[in-house]
Amino acid sequence: MESGIEIIVKEEQDDRALNELFRQKLGGAEVIPSSDAGMILMRKLARREFLRFNPARFNIWYAGGIAAAGAALALILTSGPGDSNEPVSPQESTIISTPASSNDKNPDVPAITDVKADERKRSSDIRKVVIAEKPSVRTESNNEAMSGAERSGTVVSTAEVPSVPEGGVLPGNLSDKSQLQSASGRLDNLIAASATEGCTPFRVQFKNRSLAYDSCMWSFGDGGYSRKRDPEWIFDIEGEYEVMLRVYGKDGKHSFSSIVIRVHPKPVARFEISPEAALIPNDGITFLNYSFNADKYRWDFGDGASSELFEPKHFYKRYGNYNVRLKAYSVYGCSDSLVVQNAFGSGYYVKFPNAFIPNPNGPSGGYYSNRSDEYAYVFHPVHSGVSEYQMKIFSRRGILVFETNDINIGWDGYYKGQLVDAGVYIWKVRGNYINGEQFTLMGDVTLLKNQ
Amino acid sequence: MMSDPQIIEGCAKHDRKAQQELYSRYSGFLLGVCMRYVSDRAEAEDILQESFLKIFFNIKDFSGTGSFIGWLRKIAVNTAITHYHKHLKFRYHIEIEEFVSSETGISSFEEDLFTSDELYKVLNELPAGYRMVFNLYAVEGYKHKEIAEMLGIDTNTSKSQYSRARAVIRDKLEKLRRLKGNYPAAD
């Protein structure tokens, strides 16, 4: 008991001592940067300062701004008398704020005013319609409210507004005038969505269930909008979005409906394998979990075994090419997975050329190095991480013409002191890498002779 | 010689000379910070440059109330964290020997036994995740909860990574100590 406590105390002291060591030695340590680091930094700094807006400096933005302002002024002067009834100032500001595309933007400006004019016209249309149709439409809309999904839509009329109790927009006893100005009604069932809850990036297919209408306008609550009948939208950022659909009837009546879409963060599966240069099967492999936005995990080690621990440790029975998969789940049922293919692949290799030209002046013994063998006098592999190695070379008749157990010795093209004939020879290699992975390779090489 | 407040004021106006002065005065210290967070020097210098760019562009936000050097260090640390997130690797690039729990007989580490170069090397050889957590907790003095937020991991992950990092470091230091012959081999 006592000794147990003592150990804990000691460990805590150790702990502090270790941290203290690093804090003392490295907390304020200085390392002098290489001499050109400062120069590179100043160059980067100059570049970024130039590209950044800085009122204290005359730079590219200012030049651009002045050019745009000049262009805008010229535009106003030339088109001045034609559209004198248009307010000038908004147009001007639009142009200046987007100097690069002032020409593209220009057509937009009248387009916007068109819409406004349209709406103005529409609301005056509504006035007539409402007065004429109010009593009859009211009964119709009552039916509609009960009939639900299938029959929803038709032409939505302003007269429905009072009949939808939680309509929210218009209280029942509004004066005719205000009713006309915001002539709209909320309906609950205009929108059908393929899903209302999911994870980023969340793709939702929306359907406009109105049966007959003139035009419609979707706004997705994240700044996006669409005029398509059945748009598809992707929500990239988590959050709650109120998606709104407005439908406009031929006679200018319009109504809207909304639906809430909940978008959750997508879990991200991340892990590292430790230790990297593992000796399988001797080493236990620890999987370090760096996932986030997740609370449940499933590991598939690639050898048939699996685990649901946060950071499992696994022993492989033998060396192999394993694909390790981590699937991370969030509480909202979303998941992400990461597969590390051939997780214990070493990156070691043995590769052979397919031709060589022996030195005609006599056998060399087959020693090579990358420097001395630039004429490819010796047939040998390039390699990495080889621990055991055997190479045999056969003629096409099956005679063993060369054999070595040393990877540093290649074939110089001689057999029993005689240069062999030009032609194709077969090689066979086997051995293993330093991590225990075995290899067996076979191929052919063409022996060439300088004429 | 310029004083710190003069340098800060100059940098806020994008005065080249003040910027150069700031760099020559603090680059050594900040590279010392960066070196703890990465596995090699070139990477550390990248982070150093990125940190200085942030410092130059944001120096007007420095309130002047806290310690200036602390502010600089915080920027370097944050830049290192951003860098870590960007380059989060799925695999380690260095070999860590399988850790065998060290004997409890060994108590404190004498400070003078290890040079800063050696300690940097120990940190550089750690897996990136371990290195981040150990630095933030042991050297910078953040709490596990804060570290978890900064790195986007679970608090418990931070704790367990810290204790594993400590174990690996302790093991490396023991080996180093034996290598240096200052300590008789255990057993």
Image (tube, coloured by chain):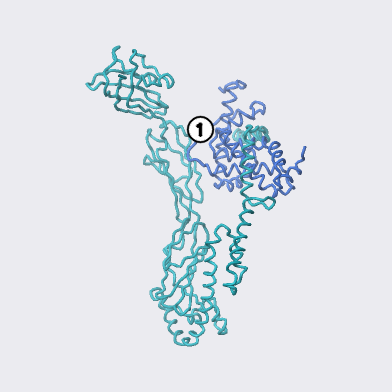
Chain colours: A cyan, B blue
Which image quadrant: the N terminus of chain A? top right
Horizontal and vertical percent for residue A78? 58, 67
Crowd rating for badge 1 (residues with CA inside 10 Å; few <14, some 14–19, many 20+)? some
Quadrant of the rendered image containing residue B114:
top right
Residue B69 visible (yes or no): no
The chain identifier of the residue carrying mark 1 reads: B
Quadrant of the rendered image containing residue A278:
top left
**Residue behind mark 1:** B94
User: A388 or A154, which is in the foreground?
Assistant: A154
Q: Which residue, as the protein is rendered here, is positioned at the far left?
A: A397
Which type of secondary structure does the marked residue at label 1 adopt?
loop
A144, above or below B157, in the image = below
A63, above or below B172, in the image = below
User: A82 or B113, which is in the foreground?
Assistant: A82
Quadrant of the rendered image containing residue B18:
top right
Type of amino acid at the residue the image marks with label 1: Ile
